[in-house]
Image (cartoon, grey):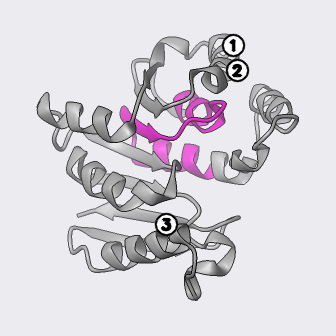
Amino acid sequence: KESEILRELREETAQMEFSEMQISPEQGVFMAFLVELIQAKRTLEIGVYTGYSALAVAMALPEHGTVTACDMNEEWANIGRKYWKRAGVEDNIDFRIGPALETLDTLLSKGKHGTYDFAFIDADKINYLEYYKITAALIKSGGVIVLDNMLWSGEVLQPEDDNALILNKTAEFIENDKRFFNMLLPIRDGLMVCLKQ
């Protein structure tokens, strides 16, 4: 059920360097489903790339819903902006350029603790655990956090490189985080879905 505009953005992204960072249509539809299921209004995204996931979520939000989208690369995000505008959701996506940890810390310092309904984490893996910890504080009870790449092509089972090691550590931390009910779904490279109690 991928929309035409999402398909066009995905196909343009597929021609780019690092196109493997693009989420799959199934992931986009699944996240849109979750957003509608929990009736989310305020969402976070850590790692934007060309904006496919931000667009999928924004299109599922109510009229005044927002996506606070964090990334370091404005050039890539600008590719998505033209599709955000065409879809009529450009004003719903608050793109924040800069280190995501700084943006998240700023949100906490501004009293945004427990105010977000949904978050998607899909950025540099080395900071995954820190992204999760801060996002867990920003998400309200009944909210959902989704983390991508939690299987890391299966390497998390016998982690050797730094990315696999931190993803393994993140999964272990989540498993023991009593604030959340979680499930690891074998969609593409593994989606960890965490529901805050």
| 122 lies above or below 103 | below
Occupied quadrant, residue 195: bottom left
Residue 95 point in image, percent of width and height: 46, 22
117 left or right of 27 in image: left
Q: Residue at x 12, y 33 (%)?
A: 109
The answer to whether marks 2 and 1 mark residues whose Cβ atoms lie closer than 8 Å is yes
Stretch in magenta:
30-59
Tell me the element at label 2.
Answer: helix
Q: Which of pointers 3 and 1 lies earlier in the amino acid sequence? A: 1
Q: Any magenta on residue 175?
A: no
Q: Residue at x 48, y 70 (%)?
A: 167
Could you tell me how far apart the alpha carbons at marks 2 and 1 are, in whole angstroms? 6 Å
Foreground tag (2 vs 1): 2
At label 2, counting other C-alpha atoms closer than 10 Å, the crowd grade (few under 14, some 14-19, many 20 or more) is some
Q: Which residue is mark 3?
A: 192
Q: Quadrant of the N terminus?
A: top right
Looking at the picture, tell me which residue is in the foreground, 56 or 168: 168
Occupied quadrant, residue 127: bottom left
Q: Is residue 132 visible?
A: yes
Could you tell me how far apart the alpha carbons at marks 3 and 1 are, in whole angstroms? 30 Å
80 left or right of 107 in image: right
Please, what is the three-letter code of the amino acid marked with disc 1? Lys
Q: Which residue is mark 1?
A: 82
| 46 lies above or below 125 | above
At label 1, counting other C-alpha atoms closer than 10 Å, the crowd grade (few under 14, some 14-19, many 20 or more) is some
Q: Residue at x 66, y 30 (%)?
A: 50
Q: Any magenta on residue 44?
A: yes
Q: How many marks?
A: 3
Foreground tag (2 vs 3): 2
Residue 79 numbered tag: 2
